[in-house]
Amino acid sequence: MDTKEKVNFISLLKETALWLGCHWDRILTVLLTLCMAAGALWYTHRAIGEREIHNRKRILEIAEQYLGCKEADGSHGEIIDYYNSYDPSPRGYKVGYTDNWCATFVSAVSLEAGLTDILPLECSCEQQINLFKELDRWREEECYLPRTGDCIYYVWDEWRRGDCTAWADHVGIVADTFGPVIKVIEGNKDDQVTYRYIFLNDICIRGYGLPDYAKSAK
């Protein structure tokens, strides 16, 4: 390699390094997407029992019955009343109509579905995460491909690179995934029950609570 070739080679290395430095987030996104695609392929071919499928669909169907319930007309009170009807109340606390009610919504759906043994009741996102951990059903991997009926937790003020481990402040139920996008049904989103669409590797995703729908399929 002559001097001119060496100069060109070094210049190419510098340009490549500069490009990698400027676009590392895109590269990471591509790698995560490939990882998720592999997970999707595995999930597609994974044997799922009919009862597990039934339970996953049921939890979503119940959640969707509440679409449109909102604070503006007080219809969200139906959800809170249903949660408060459980006796004894989790941690002895009755949820008020002006409280944040995203976890209350998820819990009320679980209660109506009769699946509280696998989707624990709580009005606090972080406390509900702790209950999933006790069940050994908490997942934080960025490459995880969520399934219908999984619980997804967020930290909205998390803007740092790396693991999102701050106190969770919102939760919803996964309705479906479309490529790199998750469709989620949530209570207390814009003060109502509605859908959210979010990318799989969004930095604000805290993790997932995974109800064991197969275990509960009796």
Image: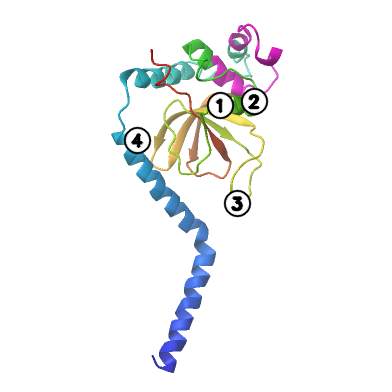
Please report the residue visible at 45 percent of the width from the left and 23 percent of the height from the top. 212
Which comes before the other along the chain, label 3 or label 2? Answer: 2
Answer yes or no: is residue 169 visible.
Answer: yes
Q: Name the residue under label 2.
A: 127
Q: Name the residue under label 3.
A: 161
* Element at label 2: helix
Q: Name the residue under label 1.
A: 132
Please report the residue visible at 49 percent of the width from the left and 30 percent of the height from the top. 184
Towards the viewer: 184 or 48: 48
Distance between the Cα atoms at labels 1 and 4?
22 Å
Which comes before the other along the chain, label 4 or label 3? Answer: 4
* Percent of width and height locating residue 181: 44, 40
Q: Is residue 44 left or right of residue 36?
A: left
Magenta residue check for 84: yes
Please report the residue visible at 61 percent of the width from the left and 30 percent of the height from the top. 170
- Find residue 62 and name its label: none
Q: In this view, does 177 lie to the left or right of 46?
A: right
* Element at label 3: loop
* Category of crowding for the residue at label 1, using alpha-carbon neighbours closer than 10 angstroms: few (below 14), some (14–19), many (at least 20): many
**Given the image, on which type of amino acid does mark 2 rest?**
Gln
Q: Is residue 88 left or right of residue 26?
A: right
Magenta region, residue range: 81-108
User: Can you tell which quarter of the image residue 175 is in?
Assistant: top left
Which comes before the other along the chain, label 4 or label 2? Answer: 4
Distance between the Cα atoms at labels 3 and 2?
25 Å
User: Can you tell which quarter of the image residue 72 is in?
Assistant: top right
Identify whether 62 is placed above or below 135.
above
* Category of crowding for the residue at label 2, using alpha-carbon neighbours closer than 10 angstroms: few (below 14), some (14–19), many (at least 20): some
* Category of crowding for the residue at label 4, using alpha-carbon neighbours closer than 10 angstroms: few (below 14), some (14–19), many (at least 20): some
